[in-house]
Amino acid sequence: MAFRMKAVKNIFPKVPTEIAAFIFVICIIPTIYFFELFVVVPSFYPVWSVWYTVHFTCGTFLMCNITSNFVAIVCTNTSVKGLLLQSKLQPKWHFCSVCESVSPPRSWHCDTCSTCIIRRDHHCMFTGCCIGHYNYRFFLAFAIHLFIATAYATYFNGYFMWDRINFQTPMALLKIVFPLAMVAFGIDVSETQLYLILFLITIMGMLFMVALLIFHTNLIWHGTTTYEKNHKIRDYDLGWRQNFKDVFGENWFLACFLPFAQLKLPGDGITWNTSDVWQMEGPKNR
Ligand SMILES: [Zn+2]
Ligand SMILES: [Zn+2]
């Protein structure tokens, strides 16, 4: 089973900070896409020239992957709801007092989602949902594409903004440090200031994605989740190769570039091989 879709009513976040973060993401990504392809790139190459078309195609490919992975994160059901769980507590299972049912190994309750999440990693405020067994690969593919897109955009934006800002004046420094205040207080509401805001958001997005990818690569490498790392649980490290397969499936390349490919993950999210059994007996429960 590659996909478990959520009911439509559960897709949108309910907490005010998450609603704000969600709206910010779904507005800023297309804004930067249009800014890059219809303002920045045409300042370097004539529209529909060969190089413009190359950058337009690459930018659109990244945009399609970012958007579809975002949709897949939000729409994939990674909760224990709807799963047939046994009523008896088995080793490494626990009882969730909120759900009033047994919960499989690596599954933890999320208060915001009001359910136990299979192989719960964390609750993502930008998508307003939990990242768990079934949507982790979309979350990582989203972060990879967003990193490539923001790095790509930062390269172009750097050249684009260089000629537009006079770095000799102290005012230029204020505009860079307090870009939003300049617009909010009406000190500078020029086109250039708006471009500068988009440039700075792109740089911050790129740095955030670098930190996120380093953190999660380290987690996957050691076969752990954010919760398990924080609680020093090291039971599920099957070696880096198998750890990556557990997250992306056998066809990791397709998983990264084709978000809607129906790819099967090796595990069911309920039964897990532990490192000690894996080392002694090889794959079980697969
Ligand atoms: Zn629960
Ligand atoms: Zn959650």
Image (cartoon, rainbow, N blue to C red):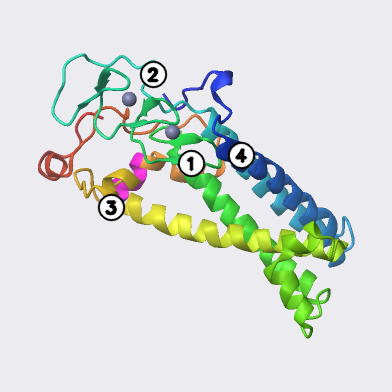
Magenta range: 240-246
**Eye-nearest disc, 1 or 3:** 1
Which amino acid is tagged 4?
Phe
Question: In which image quadrant can residue 72 be found?
Answer: top right
**Eye-nearest disc, 2 or 4:** 4
Q: Residues within 10 Å of mark 2 (few under 14, many from 20)?
A: few
- Which residue is denoted by mark 3 in the rendering? 222
Which amino acid is tagged 3?
His
Residue 70's place in the image compared with 189, above or below, is above
Which element type, helix, strand or loop, lies under badge 3?
loop
Residue at the (17%, 44%) spot, across then down: 275
Which element type, helix, strand or loop, lies under badge 2?
loop
Residue at the (24%, 47%) spot, across then down: 231
The mark nearer the N terminus, 2 or 4, is 4
Which amino acid is tagged 2?
Lys
Which amino acid is tagged 1?
Cys
Residue 124: image tag: 1
